[in-house]
Amino acid sequence: MKEKLRILKKLIVFIIILVCLDYLVGSILKKYYFLQQNSDDSRTTFVINDVTSDILILGSSRATYHYDTPMIEDSLKMSAYNGGRIASQVFYYYGMVQSVLKRYHPKLIVLDIIPYEFEPSSDSYERLSCLLPYYDGHPELREICELRGRFEKYKLLSKIYPYNSKLFFTLKTMFNVKQKTADESKIKGYYPVEKVFKVTKKYVTPSNEIDSLKLSYFKKILADCKQANVKLVVCVSPIFIQYASTPKSIAITKQLCELNKVPFYDYSTSKIFDDEKYYSDYHHLNRLGATLYTRMVLSHLK
Amino acid sequence: MLFNSIQFCIFFVIVLTSYYLLPHKIRWLLLLLASCYFYMAFVPVYILILGFTIVIDYFAGIYIERSIGKRRKTYLIASLVANIGVLAVFKYYNFFNSNITELLNHFGLPNHIPYLSILLPIGLSFHTFQAMSYTIEVYRGNQKAEKHFGIYALYVMFFPQLVAGPIERPQNILHQFYEKHEITYDNFSVGFKLILWGFFKKLVIADRLALYVSMIYKNPAEQSSKSLMLATAYFAIQIYCDFSGYSDIALGSARMMGFKLMTNFNRPYFSTSISTFWRRWHISLSTWFSDYLYISLGGNRVSVPRWYFNLFFVFLISGLWHGANWTFVIWGGINGIYLIIGIVLRPLTNKFKEMSIHHGVLKRLTKFFKIAFTFILISFTWIFFRANSFDQATTIIRRIFTAKGKLYFMDNYTLLLYPLIGLFILFLFEANEEMHHGKNMFFFNKSPIVRIATCSILVILILLIGVFDGGQFIYFQF
């Protein structure tokens, strides 16, 4: 009995210390996480909490690099923000749409999807970790965060866990380490790539598999925008890959957009972009390509 | 059920609590049921294979003990054939068949033997070897046959070491199932610290390093020498932390229930030679091969050429034990060659040792270079272990010596920085243990503040930089 009590006593003390430390470290991380500037995280925070632009662009890194926001603003005489995020997928777009629609209704949302958007990949769920810091303060994002696993909400009882793998970015902010970055107020989330790609086009046979959950969240985006009376345009920007057949994700998106009367523009097979001088790698346009592509998208939006 | 999952944590807390609440008489039943549940969480139907070998070996043990003369050997052979037969079918059938196909194709002949569409039962090589050690020990007269079927089944299926070892000997573990384990602070404290250290090694170091290693080894033909060298060194540490992390969790969870399993790793990367490395790495397997194969072949009490053959052969088989692929066989073969070279050069190294023994600085420098050289030699062998094919391994080796270019890290410096935190702590702990004859002065410091601070920092670091989506342990596939 004495041993049991000793174990219990030590265990309780250890748990109390851990809870306090977790709270303390977690609070510090939270403070500095939300003070970040010019990072992927700060742009996500901006879209969730602050953006009020007329036009909002959502998508992966392909959106970030491909949509020249200042050009869109100049051409349409409306404010615009590029809310693309590297390595994000449809669940993330859905989360962003939810947060934005909760606060205001933009005049237009441009959603850039990748040609294999709905193909199954375990990464898709892991990558939702970028939304964990918002779990506490944004109930609309909880459903998405919990897609990571059935025990996610219990893991999120820890105050440190949402900031897992964000230590260095937070330390950078904490110690005020500044990097040479573009002026966010001018570029509005658009980060062009200057590199020019020097290889031939890649040939790929697309997978026929579809993650039904991803598809269901895409359908939800269509439905929510429709319900909120927000104009939605879905695009597939150019890619330096030749698919043996139309990827199933594109075919389904086209079908769903037609059904919901949402404009859909597929540039993945456009002959105009069949030149490596427009690309920085297989998946991304460089500045030259992005300028040309934005001009073409604008022709549809005007 | 993976150790690094919430499911396991819940499962273990329930089993541990029930274990101490239940009367001693029926604790074995709880452990057996828990072990069945643990194993069935992977692929339920494979428990039938385990059941098959358990029944065969249980009766084989009894009959070996009861018989005399040639019959004893017959029962032993029957048991070994059943165990190796299961391994052959589930692990090696398709490998040998594909080699036969290639050989026949070489002569323009077709192979009509069908391939089997089966998944390798998880941890098959581990529990098969543990089962074999039982019948061999009964045959040798070192262990009495176990009459209690449930206890014997538990010997094979005890969940902490069921799927990735340590491969136990019956003399060490069987009697522990009969002993009444009281709840003690010492067992709880040591067990908990082992589990925590295991989680740290797996989540903070192994899975973190895996992110870089996988990225580089996915497409080695496009990587520079620097990237491939770093990824190879990282893999050496990844596999150590992955496997020894698993072993620590196994030892820790068993210890919390009062069981003492055999140590599987003893800071192998502090080894000053390949032979020392193999006395410190995967000790339960190395001693298994030594006890049951190497010594049976005559060990070193034979002619020198035969001794070299014995060593080489044992390492080839050890390679094949790891996986049905020629890359594993080559990995084993290289280790065997290293050992033989070490023996050949022993007079020379001994002479140098004598020279440096009285010279403090020279002695320390020699030790440092020996450790570094052993690490490089071992890391080289891991290339074959990690590569998907022989061609990929040779590409990696060729590019390590020829490919120019920068270190690849996708402009994401955190990919290189995060692992360094874990590696620093690993070095700190292991160097400390090395200096204090295996005792960790952080975990087992006299000051409770140091002990609590150590545990707390490890938990915080796991939450801060642990990889929670890392997936299964490398050795599960064997």
Image (cartoon, rainbow, N blue to C red):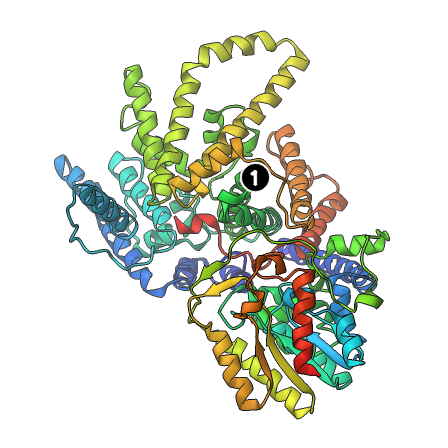
Indicate left or right for B55 with B124 as reference: left
User: x and y percent of residue A56 in the render?
Assistant: 73, 77
The number of callouts visible is 1
User: x and y percent of residue A273 in the render?
Assistant: 58, 66
Question: Is B384 in front, or is B178?
Answer: B384
**Quarter of the rendering containing residue A75:** bottom right
Q: Is residue A279 above or below residue B419?
A: below
Mark 1 residue element: loop
Query: Which residue matches tag 1?
Result: B224
Is any atom of residue B68 visible in this view?
yes
Q: Chain of mark 1?
A: B
Question: Is A11 in front, or is B395?
Answer: B395
Indicate left or right for B111 with A139 as reference: left
Q: Is residue B135 above or below residue A20?
A: above
User: x and y percent of residue B18 in the render?
Assistant: 50, 63
Quadrant placement of the C terminus of chain A: bottom right
Question: Is B150 in front, or is A282?
Answer: A282
Q: Is residue B462 above or below residue B289?
A: below
Is any atom of residue B443 visible in this view?
no
Indicate left or right for A66 with A179 as reference: left
Q: What's the residue at 82%, 65% (across, down)?
A: A184
* Local crowd size for mark 1, using a 10 Å CA cut-off: few (<14), some (14–19), many (≥20): many
Q: What's the residue at 56%, 58% (across, down)?
A: A282
Residue at the far left in the pictured view: B70
User: x and y percent of residue B288 in the render?
Assistant: 36, 36
Quadrant placement of the N terminus of chain A: bottom right
Name the amino acid, label 1. Ser
Q: Is residue A270 above or below residue B27?
A: below
Residue at the far right in the pictured view: A176
